[in-house]
Image (spheres, helix red, strand yellow):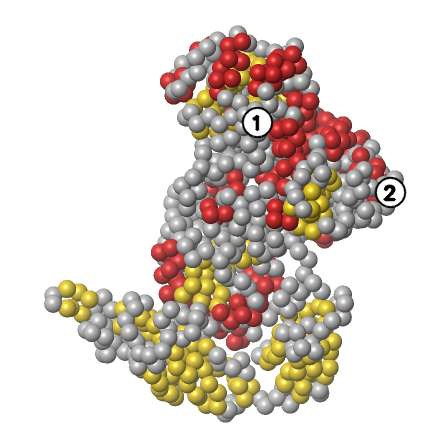
Amino acid sequence: MAAKRDQKDRKRQGGKPVTRRDFVKSGAAAGVGAAVLSTSGTALAQQSPVTAVRWNYEADVVIIGAGCTGLPAAIRARDLGASVIVIDQNFDPGGKMLHSGGQISLGGGDPLQLRDIEGKGDPEGFVTAPRQHSVAELTEDTDFLFRDHTDWSVMDAAAQAPYRYNERDLHRAYADNCFATREFLMKNYVRMGRISGTHGNGGMSRARRAVTFLMEGATTDIKKGTVAKQDAGIAGKSSSHFAPRFMEDGTTVASKGARTNGAALARPLEFSAREKGVRFILNRHMDEIIREQQFSGRVVGIRASYSPRVDPETGRRLESLWQNGNIDDRTETIYIRARKAVIIGAGGHGANAQFRSMFYPAWREPAFVSSGWALLGPRGQDASGIIAGMRVGANLAGMQQNLSYASTFHFPGNLATRDPYTDMLPGHPTFSMRGSTGINLANNSFQHLIVVNQVGKRFFNEMLVTTRQGGAAFPAGPNKGQPKKGLEHVQLDWRNASVANIRATYAEPNSVHAALAMNEGSKSPDFYSGPIWAIFDRAAVERDKWNIEPPFTSPTNGFFFKADTIQELAVKIQKGHEFQRVPIAYLAETVAKWNSYVDKGSDPEFARGADAPMHKIDTPPFYAATLYPVWHDSYGGLRINGKAQVIDMQGEPIPGLYAGGESSGGGNQHGLGRALVHGYIAGTNAAREGTS
Amino acid sequence: MGDSQPNPESPPAATTDGGATVEPHTISIAAWDVPPAIGAGERFTMKVGLKCLEGCELADSEFSIYDHDGALVATGRVPAEIWPGTAGLHVAEVELAAPAVDGLYTWSVNGPSSEEPDEGIPHAGPSLGFGIRVVSRPEYVVRIEAVDAADQTPLTEARVFMHPYRAVTDERGIAEVRVAKGTYKLFVSQTRYVTLGLPIEVDADMTARAELYVEPVVERN
């Protein structure tokens, strides 16, 4: 039935961009009562119950978010014959996946593990690099993977248990669907290299990670697996609309000429989705999930508002890289009916300061953003999927797990930008919204500066500010908090969590906590910690050869200042930075004190000088650049079961509602693997739902 | 040292100009290029820069340098030229004589006083402290050869520190540090490499080879 309807839809659309009129006709034909296209969502929103809603569009499956959960869900649902509409608040599909490293940990005996075990390459001949792991390190089954992902005994170097609290039904399904998901990705133009270790919290016992790549070629051709050099990015000069971040060299995981990162995953999935007839309504933020009754009945659709993004320099609306399949609707509010299901893949909560303060009140500080802030825009990662689910009765899961992964929040070490995680270069349409790439410093370079809080006081040993622990994952070992490394690791062994082991391996980096601490400038009721500043001088720039010119810094975005004296620098910071709410009153005193420590050769406050030389900050001009922490991952969200159905407060699935990725909770796995599997599962089950 | 602090001992009073109160402008000071280790009694040079935060012209303004006992040891005037790379800093080089006894001393630079208003506008009397490290005459030479641990190629411009002594490697990866007898923490540091640090006791000329490893790139995923 669904397949027939879809054929009818496709015939009507003729493979061309679809108009609102097409959907009105479609809705009318389906007997939905959508004879008239609404022009005012506000009025309709006040009309309840659901029977009063005038649907603007309808499809079998409506997906919120064109990211790591939404795109595989959309393709999978289409493969099973469902018609699919994907909305996204941003102007371009991809979500966080687009700026990711493209690292996918699956496992359980997935096709790439088997490929490496057999010593084979890929059918296209791109993967010629030697295998990186022994057969034993690649051999496992789904039961083994399931145990790894639910192992109570594992403690990481921060004395947190990353696997203990994972939802068991969800991870049983995860283990059972890793093979199919890896295979699904490969069938949808995603090329992946050799298995290389395991991504954060992807399990302790076996190697499971593969990185996505495209081969550098004359043109960008997803079917052929190539990316033009200009699209892949030119080191230190440019990113592109295709890839917001410079694509790294992939020689060791594939072959010479391979370029890797999340663009090699997101763009092939987007390409495949468009090719298969998935329709996109971009610039469209989901505001409400519509259920027959607030806490009962089926989920039948969504309400969404127009959320265009405009280039501040040209005044033009930003447009997606590819257009085919887009529905360009600029109505303020629209309603979209889902005949079978709604899937929430709207991302996490890292950019919602109020939401994330549930986990850590100090993160209510609005200065700090989620990774991909400029790429995703002000409404990205805003917890809207989770909040909308809660409004129709959803339960939550994994709410403590934000504190169980080292990358959830940290200092990336990229100065002079509000989004230090995404080292975007000019070339992407959102570059003007951040204004600067940032000065990306290696840890050793922090010897040349001091870091101060909003009142100008140091708060931590600068050489340790960017230190962070990796996730507890293969090959594990003491540096990940585990007594044994690699194949020696024993699942479910009490010794993993023994007091002696924890004492021996505990090494939680605390710089973020010190940065977020209250200071003399913190005021009631929120006691914001304020911005963090790296302070350095011309001698540092010359000594360590930093490039502080545009595009790495911006003279106008308020994240980088230059002055002839430290006092003048303090004045400029207070006048020019949006979140500098109080005078940076102690800056001159702090610099003078620091210089006296350098003269003495020791730092009585934070023990600098023990692991690197100390340098005076005395040579004009002087510089201040933000050193912002970032909230990267989101753990804690909607509770879902093994079918990716959203579960209500009574433990029952909410009919017609699915979720995955960072909109869901109970899966403390970093990166793309969990979201891709959730999307695959959600798309499968949503397409198989009955039609409402 | 980086900058001036308003002198709390002699805050300039606000004055009136035609009945209106005129707040004093702040002059800020920079002082740099003091050698990290100066032989006892040796002469050395340093730089002093002045700037009014309100943008007043400070060409030919006078500054004074006082030693650790508060004795005036030098005066100077800043020229009209703006120091390269700055927006409005007037900079003068001044020659001084180090104390005759080893030790760490705190001297200070004072800017123009409030008795010399610019067009009737008083300026806050600034003062900035800076350190003078006086050392025994170095007796030994520590020769450091810095190389990349992976391919053994020389590391040029690596920084060698034996506080308070320091040197930079040449194109052969070699630096020579002249130091007094004693125990030091030797650091060899280069951009993008992990700093090598180890204790070292010097009681004769010495040679050491420092193999530095490239700092792992933090995975950003």
Residue under the image location 21 percent in, 71 percent down: B121
Name the residue tied to disc 2: A119
Q: Amino acid at mark 1?
A: Gly
Q: Amino acid at mark 2?
A: Gly
State which tag comes first along the sequence, 2 or 1: 2
Q: Quadrant of residue A6?
A: top right
Labels 2 and 1 share a subunit:
yes
Residue under the image location 61 percent in, 18 percent down: A10
Work out whether residue B56 can be spotted.
yes
Q: Chain of mark 2?
A: A
Residue under the image location 48 percent in, 80 percent down: B34
Name the residue tied to disc 1: A325
Taking B142 as reference, is B43 left or right? left
The C terminus of chain A - image quarter: top right
Residue A88 spot, x, y in % from top left: 53, 30
Residue A621 spot, x, y in % from top left: 44, 69
Give A14 or A85, whichever is nearer the viewer. Answer: A14
Q: Quadrant of residue A306?
A: top left
Residue B22 spot, x, y in % from top left: 20, 66
Which element carries disc 1, helix, strand or loop?
Answer: loop
Q: Are there few (<14), some (14-19), or many (20+) residues within 10 Å of tag 1?
A: many
Q: Nearer the viewer, mark 2 or mark 1?
A: 1
On screen, A452 above or below A689? below
The N terminus of chain A - image quarter: top right
Q: Chain of mark 1?
A: A
Which element carries disc 2, helix, strand or loop?
Answer: loop
